[in-house]
């Protein structure tokens, strides 16, 4: 099945796939967004710095094409200016989200620090971040989990490609960790919790988008 990046928000592809079955090729030339988009990106990164965020611009990943089968996911990516994802139209920029569940089925949630670029002061699932140029997004999942929570998964799967309304595309993975796993909070978070196995039982601070994600992955 070929995945059309021009489709509206929603599910682009559904796994699961083993990380070893996620193939990735990179174009050499960066995506050209146009003068208006570049100006909006300039303004967005300046606004972040004005509120004290140490965010630095650079190159990240953009989805060009994807082809999914039950046993394989092939991605074609290209470099893209990171700050383009801060605009109202994120131009199919790609981020990785590694959702974490323990042996009891609980979900790791963290409250994002006030200075971060996205979801500042809000609760998010697991670990997430930028796919670096030349990196396979399946590798990004484990890297972000280690950087943000200092844990390694006992089991890791690639679960889905999802476009959110802003045009940002999420490469979503699921990490399984042992019961009573100890996590170490990083500077991007100021609190964490293990939420119940059933998303219907999550606390009020769980954003509706998180509940939808939980229901999707639990199913």
Image (spheres, helix red, strand yellow):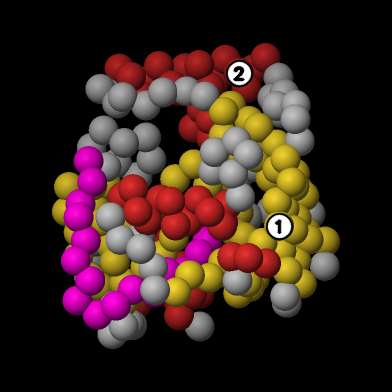
Residue 129: percent from the left, percent from the top? 44, 45
The circle drawn on residue 196 is: none
Real-space Cα separation, disc 2 to disc 1, in angstroms: 30 Å
Q: Residue at x 45, y 74 (%)?
A: 155
Residue 146 found in image quarter? bottom left
- Indicate whether residue 205 is drawn in magenta: no
Give the residues in magenta: 169-187
- Residue with the mark numbered 1: 23
Which mark lies nearer to you, 2 or 1? Answer: 1
Left or right for 71, reference 84: right
Residue 116 found in image quarter? top left
* Above or below: residue 48 compared with residue 94: above
Residue 103: percent from the left, percent from the top? 31, 83
Give the camera-side residue of 80 and 155.
Answer: 155
Q: Residue at x 26, y 33 (%)?
A: 115
- Residue with the mark numbered 2: 38
Give the camera-side residue of 126 and 25.
Answer: 25
Residue 176: percent from the left, percent from the top? 39, 74
Q: Residue at x 60, y 36 (%)?
A: 133
Number of numbered discs overlaid on the protein picture: 2
Residue 54: percent from the left, percent from the top? 31, 24
Give the camera-side residue of 70 and 90.
Answer: 70
Q: Residue at x 19, y 76 (%)?
A: 180
**Quarter that holds the N terminus:** bottom right
* Above or below: residue 153 compared with residue 36: below
Element carrying mark 1: strand
Please indicate, yes or no, whether residue 5 appears anywhere in the rendered image: no
Q: Residues within 10 Å of mark 1 (few under 14, many from 20)?
A: some
């Amino acid at each position: 099945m070929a995945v059309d990046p021009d489709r509206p928000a929603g599910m682009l592809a559904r796994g699961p796939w083993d990380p070893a079955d996620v193939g990735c090729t990179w174009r050499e030339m960066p995506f050209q967004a146009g003068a208006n988009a570049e100006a909006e990106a300039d303004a967005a990164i300046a606004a972040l710095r004005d509120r004290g965020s140490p965010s630095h611009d650079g190159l990240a990943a953009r989805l060009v094409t994807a082809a999914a089968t039950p046993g394989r996911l092939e991605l074609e990516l290209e470099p893209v200016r990171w700050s383009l994802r801060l605009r109202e139209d994120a131009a199919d920029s790609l981020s990785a989200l590694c959702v974490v569940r323990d042996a009891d089925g609980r979900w790791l949630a963290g409250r994002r620090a006030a200075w971060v670029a996205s979801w500042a002061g809000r609760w998010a699932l697991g670990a997430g971040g930028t796919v670096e140029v030349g990196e396979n997004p399946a590798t990004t999942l484990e890297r972000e989990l280690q950087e943000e929570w200092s844990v390694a998964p006992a089991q890791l799967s690639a679960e889905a490609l999802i476009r959110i309304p802003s045009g940002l595309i999420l490469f979503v993975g699921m990490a399984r960790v042992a019961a009573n796993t100890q996590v170490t909070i990083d500077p991007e978070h100021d609190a964490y919790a293990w939420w119940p196995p059933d998303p219907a039982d999550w606390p009020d601070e769980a954003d509706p988008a998180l509940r939808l994600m939980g229901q999707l992955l639990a199913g």
